[in-house]
Amino acid sequence: MMSGSNFWVIGGEFGSMNFHKLVEGSAQVQGPFKTRKEAEDCWKKVSEENRHRAGVRFSIVEEPNRASS
């Protein structure tokens, strides 16, 4: 079942281990992806590339379909 949503992989390097504030200039956004599976594949790739950097974190976010009324 297709949701009509877009998925994004967002993240970067955070200034502390509480992961509240990104280091300026480190933000990364990848997507949009039409399926969560595509976003998960991207997330796995960028997470693996940065696994040696403890302050780097990525998340998958879903942008809901905005159907016109």
Image (tube, rainbow, N blue to C red):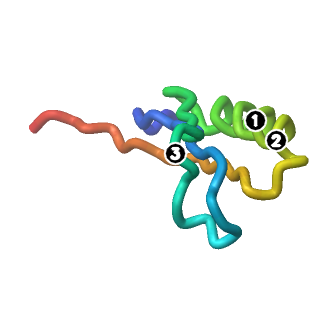
Q: Quadrant of the C terminus?
A: top left
Q: Residues within 10 Å of mark 3 (few under 14, many from 20)?
A: few
Q: Secondary structure at mark 3?
A: loop
Distance Cα–Cα, label 2 vs label 1: 6 Å
Residue 50 lies in quadrant: top right
Image quadrant where residue 4 sits? top left
Identity of the residue drawn at 71% across and 39% down: 43
Q: Measured along the vertical axis of the image, is residue 43 above or below residue 18? A: above
Q: Residues within 10 Å of mark 1 (few under 14, many from 20)?
A: many
| Residue at image location 51% in from the left, 47% down from the top | 61
The mark that comes first in sequence, 3 or 1, is 3
Q: Residues within 10 Å of mark 2 (few under 14, many from 20)?
A: some
Residue under label 2, please give it. 50
Relative vertical location of residue 7 with respect to residue 22 in this rendering, above or below: above
- Between 17 and 7, the one lying in front of the other is 17
Closer to the chain start, of discs 3 and 2, is: 3
Amino acid type for the residue under numbered disc 1? Val
* Drawn side of residue 61 relative to residue 58, left or right: left
Identify the residue at image location x=53%, y=34%. Answer: 29
Q: Nearer the viewer, mark 3 or mark 1?
A: 3
Residue on which the image places disc 1: 46
Label pair 2/1, CB-CB below 8 angstroms: yes
